[in-house]
Amino acid sequence: MFETLKEQPADKILALVQTYLDDPRETKIDLGVGVYKDADGKTPIMRAVKDAEKRLWETETTKSYTKLAGEPAFLDAMIGLVLGDAVPRDTVAAAATPGGTGAIRQAFELARMANPDVRVFVSDPTWPNHLSILKHMGIAAVPYRYFDDESRGVDFDGMMEDLAQAKKGDVVLVHGCCHNPTGANPNMTEWQAIVDLLLETGAVPMVDIAYQGFGDGLDKDAEPTRLIASSVPETIIAASCSKNLGIYRERTGVVMAVSQKASAQKLNQGTLAYLNRQLYSFPPDHGARLVTTVLTDDALRADWRAELEKMRTGMLALREQLAAELQRLSGSDRFGFIAQHRGMFSRLGATPEQVDQLRDAHGVYLVGDSRLNIAGLNEKSVPILAKAIIDVGI
Ligand code: LMR
């Protein structure tokens, strides 16, 4: 029966990781996959996570199953982190998932269970795996305009025009902060207008928040999510702990369904637990326990926040250095958007040929759509990248 299988397209981000590894040049620069790196190119285990791991090793007494929706303490901690006190706790159903991708998958499953004909509106561009999962599930993806190629900011008018086509029964997928792959984000006035439009159309928002704390700070980055969840009748949220706690391989995430009707919570909670059972039974627990330990212990939480803040401000400094260097080399302000963008990524707006040239002639690896991972840079590689960008004529 396997002879009927077809080759599946490689994920372009993951394929790039291998191409980079195969490149023998010592001067190569990896600005591809969205993994944080420090100035030495290492992806560190955060101090608080390491401490939590030690504590866990000493105190954990069993590896028996956790709860089907994950540990309630983890869910409470994550709801607090993402939603603050924007909505009453008893309006939120939540389940632990294997990473943010698991949360996205469960969110789509939930939407499809509620409406078998659901369409999901996705920003153009969006994280490629959103589209891949939707295609795999046979759910229609409807692109909405998002990125203005000229300004490299949000094409807000285009976005609003396209989102006006969404209807009750549709889902509108937005990136809560640090848009992946562009780095361009709506401001709070624009988010309010998006919320007003959602209220008008009746479409359900789904917020993918994978980079909380990498943009303008933990609470600032959660503001759009909190505004949405507190304003519309129903919200779906997929949150990841991979980046802001640096626990990529532990696969730790959470899916939430917020319903202003508190009476809906029980049904939503049961449905999320059911979905876990169908896809993988119990969610992974190790990473979730680390997160709970860090978020619920005052000293660990403070230390984690401080380390995360250092990562965030470091990325901002690199953005500013790169924008300034490009201004110097180009004699123009046309790269100012790099300092305006937030999160790990910026879309340069280069052609695929220019991206190829950056790789072939300069050993600089960007994703094909010209997304660059700011965290892959350091003070020394910024001038090298700036020169390469000008050399290939971007
Ligand atoms: C990315 O966008 O590079 C990250 O989210 C990693 C991934 O899984 O694609």
Image: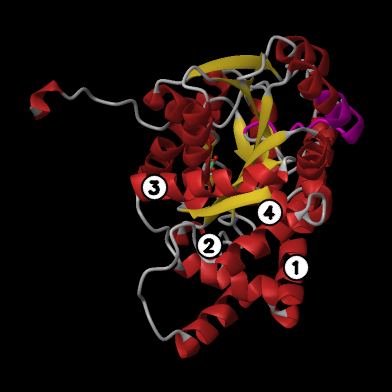
**Residue picked out by circle 1:** 305
In the image shown, does 230 or 173 lie closer to the viewer?
A: 230
The stretch drawn in magenta includes residue 306: no
In this rendering, position of residue 91 left or right of residue 151: left
> Element at badge 3?
helix
Q: Residue 61: where, in percent of width, then height? A: 41, 86
Gap between marks 2 and 4, in whole Å?
27 Å
Q: Residue 246: where, in percent of width, then height? A: 57, 61
Query: What segment carries the magenta color?
Result: 181-194
In primary-sequence order, the first of circles 3 and 4 is 3
**Residue picked out by circle 4:** 380
In this rendering, position of residue 61 left or right of residue 122: left
User: What kind of residue is marked 3?
Assistant: Leu
Q: Assign the N terminus to one quadrant of the image.
A: top left
The stretch drawn in magenta includes residue 189: yes
User: What kind of residue is marked 4?
Assistant: Lys
Q: Nearer the viewer, mark 3 or mark 4?
A: 3
Gap between marks 2 and 1, in whole Å?
15 Å
User: What kind of residue is marked 2?
Assistant: Ile
> Element at badge 4?
loop
**Residue picked out by circle 3:** 21
Q: Mark 2–mark 4 contact, CB under 8 Å?
A: no
Mark 1: give few (<14), some (14-19) or many (20+) Cα within 10 Å: many
